[in-house]
Structures are given as structure tokens and as C-alpha cells.
Image (spheres, grey):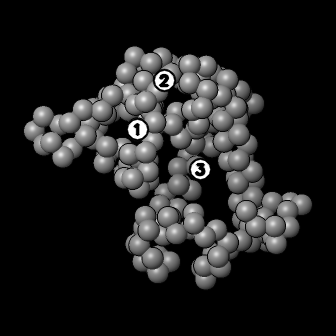
Amino acid sequence: MQTTTASQLYNALSRLSRQVLRMEHRMARCDMRGWQRMHRGQAHLLSIISRKNGASQRDLAEEMDVRPSSMTEALLKMEAAGLITRKQDENDQRIMRIFLAEAGEKAVRQSNVAALDLTTGLFNGLTSEEQVQLLSLIEKLSASLESMDRPGMFGEHGHEFREKHHRHRGSGCPNSIPFYPKNRNPDDDY
């Protein structure tokens, strides 16, 4: 019974995650009229830069949990679009600092309005007490996942495991448990 309930919870959370990502994607496309090709990751990166204006490129890559080369590519595109500026650190020329440009500030404001609309609509059906309870439960789940994501947990090393997992989804990692949504054939791999 416990395993069945856990599987149902996992599937429900996975479905909810996909729905939220689809909605964020649609909202980003609608609200970022100044730069139509912005995707969810770029909107998220702009949000981080707005909170940590002047952060190093390395710190942003770490915060986003991406390879430094991927961060460089994303920042070059955003710089070409006029959303950010990159400047060398005054004390250490090897460090590149990232700042929000005026167009980036406008995009962040638009994104914040869209995010508020999304969160208001998403949680509108829950009472204040239910929202607090849900937040507490999600934080517990997140802490549980973080404890599982430590070096050596799956015979791999933290970030390297995540990179390998993204490259080889469903590759039969010995400690993985496949969960499939209803009406999904496990043979239809991503």
C-alpha cells in the first residue's frame, strides 16, 4: 500500500511539474514581447541576475547548476539581445561580472508580473492554511532529495551524476525506479 501511494504521489508531482513548466513557457513567450526567443531558463537566469547584479559568471553557473561553457553560451546570447552586460572584475581580470541592462530589467519586471499571475492562479484553490502545509511538505521533500544527491549516493559524484542522468535518461541506473504516468508506455523513451 505504501509503495502504491508513493508511486501515485511521485506521478502526481511529475505531472504537476510538467504542467507548471508548460505554463511558465507559454507565459514567458507571451510576456517577453521584446525578445520572443527567450525560454524558461533564460527568464530564470535573468531573475537571478536581477537579485545578484554583478555576480560572477562562475557563481551564476553554479546557481543554475549548469556547466560553465553552457553559461557562457547563454550569457553571450543574452548580451547580444541587449539584456545583460558583461564586465571584467576590476581586481581579477579572469573573472567576468554580469549586470542587468535596461532591457533586461524590463524583461524581469514583465516576468515577475507573469509569475505573480501564475502563482495566484495556481494556488487560488487552496486556503492559506493549505498553502502553508503544502509549502512545509514540499520543503521536506526537497530536503530529502538533496540528501540523496550527495557524492557517492549512486556511485557517482553530485553534479556529474546529474549531467550523466540528463544525457542518458532511462539508461538503467541500478538504483533508479522508473515511474510512468498513466497511459504511458515505458518502451516509448524520451
Rendered location of residue 34, percent (x, y): 56, 19
> Could you tell me the amino acid type at mark 2?
Val
Instruction: Tell me where residue 45 sits by quadrant.
Output: top left
Rendered location of residue 151, percent (x, y): 40, 72
In three-dimensional space, the C-alpha distance between marks 3 and 2, rounded to whole angstroms, equals 29 Å
**Residue 2: mark in rendering:** none
In three-dimensional space, the C-alpha distance between marks 2 and 1, rounded to whole angstroms, equals 18 Å
**Residue 108: mark in rendering:** 2
Tell me the mark number nearer the camera, choosing from 3 and 1: 1
In three-dimensional space, the C-alpha distance between marks 3 and 1, rounded to whole angstroms, equals 38 Å
Find numbered disc 3 in the image and state the secondary structure of the residue it sits on: helix
Count residues near mark 2 (Cα–Cα under 10 Å), then give few for <14, some for 14-19, many for 20+. Answer: many
> Could you tell me the amino acid type at mark 3?
Leu
Rendered location of residue 2, percent (x, y): 74, 70
Q: Nearer the viewer, residue 175 or 143?
A: 175
* Residue for point 43% across, 45% down: 73
Q: Outermost residue toward the left?
A: 91
Which quarter of the rendered picture does the N terminus lie within? bottom right
Which residue in the protein does label 3 denote? 137
